[in-house]
Image (tube, helix red, strand yellow):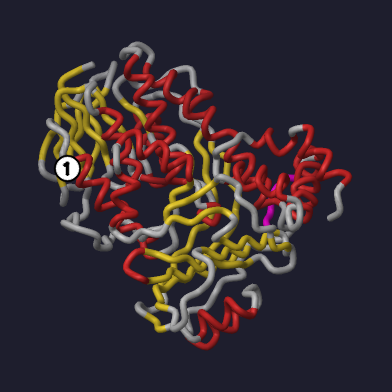
Amino acid sequence: MGTHAVVLGGSMGGLLAARALVGHYERVTVVDRDALPAGADHRKGVPQGKHFHTVLLRGAQALEQMFPGLVDEFVAEGVPRSNFTLEATFVLNGQRMIRTDTGATAIQLTRPMLEGTIRSRVASHPGVKVVDGQEVLEPVFDGRRVTGVRTSAGLLEADLVVDALGRSGRSRKWMAEWGFPVPAEDTIEIDTMYVSRLVRPKVPFRDKLTLVGPIPGRPNGFAYAAQEGDRWMLTVVGMAGDHPPTDEDAFLEFLRRSAPPDVFESIASAEPLTELRAHRFPASLRRRYEQLNRYPEGLLAFGDAVCSFNPIYGQGMTVAAMEAEALRKCLSEGEHDLARRFFRAAAKIIDPVWQLNAGGDLALPEIPGRRPLSTRLVNRYVSRLQKVAGHDPVVATAFVRTIGLLNPPSSMFAPRVLARVLFGRA
């Protein structure tokens, strides 16, 4: 494909994009403005890193393909792997899901451990260089294509530049400056804040994960999840301005609104290992690059720079891993029309996830947004499905495998699932 590719941003999206480029370019350089830690430490550029993360089974499959042995390496280092829903409790739409073997599992680890390990794996490939402490200024555009990027340390010539700068990705701004059409943006104003801390329960808790979702009238919930190092991550989330406080006593009272008594008791008596940490997420954002008919050659947007999902659904990293698979396939087919082919492939990955998450957000009357008849009908169906999943293992399995991105949303409407939802006992 060429001599040199440069990835802007060394977070998870950038690292996965860099892995997709390996083998297609002689050299791959990842540029990040942070001073990157040598191991599993937090860094300034990832404020969400102090909150709950999970890698869904579909994401684990993609990571395992890109980094063989990765999941077993994590598990050997003490990372819990939970079986949905045998070892995890889901309370969705106010209904506790039945315990059944759905065939879906997830690995649960802190973001610094995940990102640090992936960064080390990516950097171990010949020709890959991860450069930190450099601010990205602008790409170099010669009137036909991008030929490099200027950073605070100088010029990097490149055959391809990948914008993986997260939801603040600047490709849209650069394209406007160069006279290209810019992608339309879809947003859902969710006004979400989450407050988290690591704890250590005094008594071992029975499940590896408890997840309680928001419901109409109570747009808040939480995740309580086992992590590596015999620690547990507690992340409490509030949407539509119903935000968890960071005062200790008020925080527990806020949690009590959604936590089952046994879970609340475990959390309230646990040993705090960190202070309470807050992060705000104003809106889900999607940029419609796939709808454009002209792109600058030599420039791609990737990951959150294309679509930034509501984090409460935990699907962002899995989607980025699937995008990396799509990018590798597009690169294997050559450079011609690369941007158009990649953005269309990415849109096929993003479409069902965006629709699923948007439906979940708009099921809460507190979230502003247009609700066409199709959205209202689907949300009524999903609401009933979640209630039937409280006792029906077939329905529970269909739902869990869908939100885990193992199966498409259409699987929730398969005939045997549809019949159980419509005629089963809610």
Residue 384 at what x, y percent from top left?
Answer: 80, 51
Determine if the magenta segment contains residue 414: no
Residue 407 position by quadrant: top right
Q: Secondary structure at mark 1?
A: strand
Where 125 sits versus 193, above or below? above
State the residue at coordinates (15%, 23%): 26
272 lies left or right of 30: right
- Residue 370 among magenta residues: yes
Residue 156 lies, in percent from the top left, at: 14, 32
Residue occupying the point 32% across, 19% down: 331
Residue 397: image x %, image y %?
65, 46
**What type is the residue that disc 1 sits on?**
Val
Q: Which region is colored magenta?
A: 367-371
Q: Is residue 328 above or below residue 196?
A: above
Q: Residue furthest right?
A: 423
Closest to the observer, 353 or 193: 353
Residue placed at 40% from the left, 31% from the top? 176
Q: Which residue is mark 1?
A: 130
